[in-house]
Amino acid sequence: MKFFIPAANDHTRAEDVYKNIAKFAQAPITEKRIWKLRWHDQQMNVECEVGKTLPSHYLTGKELVLAIFDCENVYKICTLTHGAVRGEPIVVEKNPQSIAIYFSETANN
C-alpha cells in the first residue's frame, strides 16, 4: 500500500497534513510510515488502519484514522478529534503483541 492520508488529494498535500498532525500530536516524522497496527487491549485483539475507523470502544465514532506514529515506547493513533486537530491521540503501549505494518513505499519514493 502506498502512503496516503485520507482526504488529501495528492502526495504533496498528504505530506503537509502528515507533518501537521505529527507536530500537533508531538510525534516524530519518520521515513517509514505505519499503515496498520495490531495490538492486544483488555483481553481483545485490536487492529486499526489508516483510512478506516477504530473499534467502537475507543469512542471515536465514525472518524477515520488519519495517521499512526511510532513514538519510542508507544504508538499514537490520530483521528480528527484525537490528536490531529484537537484532543489527545489514542496511545497504545508497545509490547511483544503489538505489530506495526508499514506502507510499502515511503513518502519520498
Image: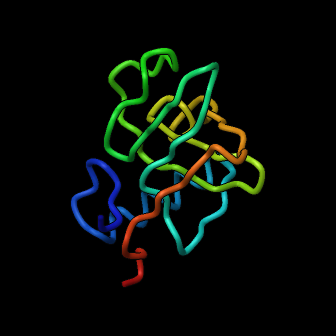
Query: Camera-side residue: 65 or 39?
Result: 39
Which residue is located at x 47 percent, y 58 percent? Answer: 101
Query: Camera-side residue: 57 or 27?
Result: 57
**Corner quadrant of residue 65:** top left
The residue sitting at the left extreme is 9
Which residue is located at x 43 percent, y 16 percent? Answer: 56
- x, y percent for residue 93: 72, 40
Quarter of the picture containing the C terminus is bottom left
Which residue is located at x 49 percent, y 16 percent? Answer: 59
- What is the image's colouring? rainbow
Up-down: is 21 above or below 105?
above
The residue sitting at the right extreme is 73
Q: Is residue 62 left or right of residue 95?
A: left
- x, y percent for residue 55: 43, 23
The residue sitting at the bottom extreme is 109
- x, y percent for residue 61: 38, 18
Up-down: is 5 above or below 85?
below
**Corner quadrant of residue 70:** bottom right
- x, y percent for residue 81: 49, 29
